[in-house]
Image (cartoon, rainbow, N blue to C red):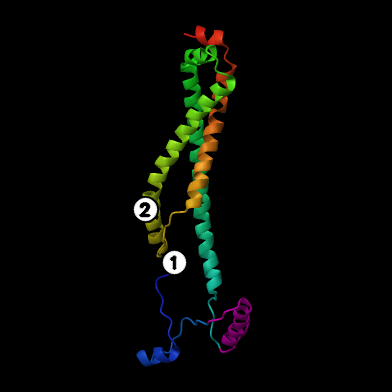
């Protein structure tokens, strides 16, 4: 969790505003280069110790930002893993659906074969249906993604005592679309292979 808001002022202003208060709990220095930060740390800490001032700890803004980034990275990895698990479950569900679909339409597929449909055409029909279902699922997910993202962003901001902005990433939408198409094609491959292997006699004799 992020610390509460802090105001940094020169020591002269602090003495003028609160006379008689000589306690200093924090010293903030500004440096533009990492080497300068490390040099200041090496010089300040021994000097304070020599003057009898105990230093409880020191940190730089870069170190603080790194710690925050690591927390955000953990959340990002968790969300990616959750998305992969959901996609896998969806793919298995689509595979089962297409398998049942082919099983229930064996006579229809047999008639198509009898009137001249090639195995490639049969496979294209099955895979086309699966890809269409996957694209519809992508569209539904796209509609639900924005409000869910806004809700999670607001919740994360409350937990970390900070503000986070959410934005639409067109590249992410395209990647999700491509992944949906590929997943739909892969999920229907088993059902398409089963449909292609059916002979006209077997398909028409199925009850």
Res 113 visible: yes
Residue 33 higher or lower than 203, as above or below: below
Start-end of magenta stretch = 30-51
Res 18 visible: no
Query: Real-space Cα distance between discs 1 and 2?
Result: 20 Å
Which element type, helix, strand or loop, lies under badge 1?
loop
Query: Could you say where residue 113 lies in the image, as x and y percent from the top left?
Result: 54, 14
- Does residue 9 show up magenta in the picture? no
- Does residue 37 show up magenta in the picture? yes
User: Which residue bears the numbered disc 1?
Assistant: 2
* Quadrant for the N terminus in the image: bottom left
Which element type, helix, strand or loop, lies under badge 2?
helix
Tell me if mark 2 has few (under 14), some (14-19) or many (20+) residues whose alpha carbon lies within 10 angstroms of its own. few
Residue 20 higher or lower than 55, as above or below: below
- Name the one closer to the observer, 117 or 180: 117
Sequence-first disc among 1 and 2: 1
Residue 134 numbered mark, or none: none
Please report the residue visible at 53 percent of the width from the left and 85 percent of the height from the top: 53
Residue 86 higher or lower than 108, as above or below: below
Please report the residue visible at 64 percent of the width from the left and 78 percent of the height from the top: 35
Question: Dominant secondary structure of the magenta stretch?
Answer: helix
Query: Could you say where residue 83 lies in the image, as x and y percent from the top left?
Result: 49, 44
Please report the residue visible at 47 percent of the width from the left and 52 percent of the height from the top: 170
User: Which residue bears the numbered disc 2?
Assistant: 151
Query: Could you say where residue 203 lies in the image, as x and y percent from the top left?
Result: 52, 11
Label 1 vs label 2, nearer the camera: 2
């Amino acid at each position: 969790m992020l610390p509460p808001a802090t105001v940094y002022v020169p020591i002269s202003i602090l003495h003028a505003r609160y006379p008689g208060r000589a306690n200093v709990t924090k010293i903030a220095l500004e440096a533009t280069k990492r080497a300068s930060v490390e040099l200041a740390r090496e010089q300040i800490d021994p000097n304070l110790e020599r003057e009898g001032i105990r230093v409880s700890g020191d940190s730089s803004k870069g170190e603080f930002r790194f710690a925050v980034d690591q927390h955000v990275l953990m959340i990002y990895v968790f969300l990616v893993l959750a998305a992969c698990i959901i996609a896998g479950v969806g793919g298995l569900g689509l595979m089962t659906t297409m398998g049942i679909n082919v099983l229930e339409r064996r006579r229809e597929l047999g008639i198509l074969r009898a009137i001249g449909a090639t195995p490639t055409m049969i496979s294209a029909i099955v895979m086309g249906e699966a890809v269409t279902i996957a694209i519809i699922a992508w569209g539904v997910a796209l509609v639900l993604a924005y409000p869910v993202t806004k809700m999670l962003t607001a919740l994360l901001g409350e937990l970390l005592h900070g503000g986070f902005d959410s934005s639409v990433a067109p590249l992410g939408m395209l990647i999700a679309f491509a992944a949906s198409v590929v997943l739909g094609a892969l999920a229907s491959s088993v059902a398409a292979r089963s449909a292609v292997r059916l002979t006209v006699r077997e398909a028409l004799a199925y009850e």
